[in-house]
Amino acid sequence: MSALVADTHTAVWYLLNDARLSLSAREALDAASAAGNPIFVSAISVVELFYLAEKGRVPLAALQRLRTALADPLSGFVVADVNLDVADAIAAIPREAVPDLPDRVIAATACALRVPLVTRDRQIRAASVETIW
């Protein structure tokens, strides 16, 4: 498996071995990791996770687990910057299809990197983005 982008929930669920992660998603992430390919997480996912933890919608431990993985070069997780390529790729993600800005940025990150996005998000999966779930 090549490199992948994991959306916010996918990354957390994978790291926490959460049953909500689909078998296909888990297998794709495992394969990327086993092959030594990066599992990219958009920087906006870290911001989003902080915001969700702040609101009490996810445990603070989820944010800490992701931050630990991103800091460990052996984890396979790599932060993907929100840069000009990602900003330009947002045009390929219609706002009508994916109205949430963080979701658009995450999808655009996968497009800019030209790798599949692992996501459960139905709106993103219905848009013109290569996804795995």
Image (spheres, grey):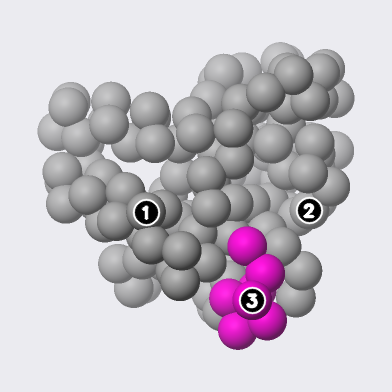
Residue tagged by mark 2? 115
Q: Mark 3 points at which residue?
A: 36
The answer for how far apart the CA atoms under marks 3 and 2 are is: 15 Å
Q: Distance between the residues labelled 1 and 2?
A: 22 Å
Q: Magenta part of the protein: which range?
A: 31-38
Q: How far apart are marks 3 and 1 (CA)?
A: 16 Å
Task: Find out whether residue 37 is within the magenta segment.
Answer: yes
> Considering depth in this image, is 40 or 133 the residue closer to the camera?
40
* C-beta proximity under 8 Å, tags 3 and 2: no
Residue behind mark 1: 71
- At x 38%, y 28%, the residue is 47
Question: What is the quadrant of residue 34 in the picture?
Answer: bottom right
Nearer to us of marks 3 and 2 is 3
Decide which of 103, 61 is in the foreground and name it: 61
Q: Is residue 33 above or below residue 91?
A: below
Residue 121, horizontal then vertical, whole percent: 57, 44
Check residue 48 in the rendering and tell me which mark sits there, or answer none: none
Callout 3: SS: loop
Q: What element carries label 1?
A: helix
Please tell me in which quadrant of the rendered image residue 18 appears.
bottom left
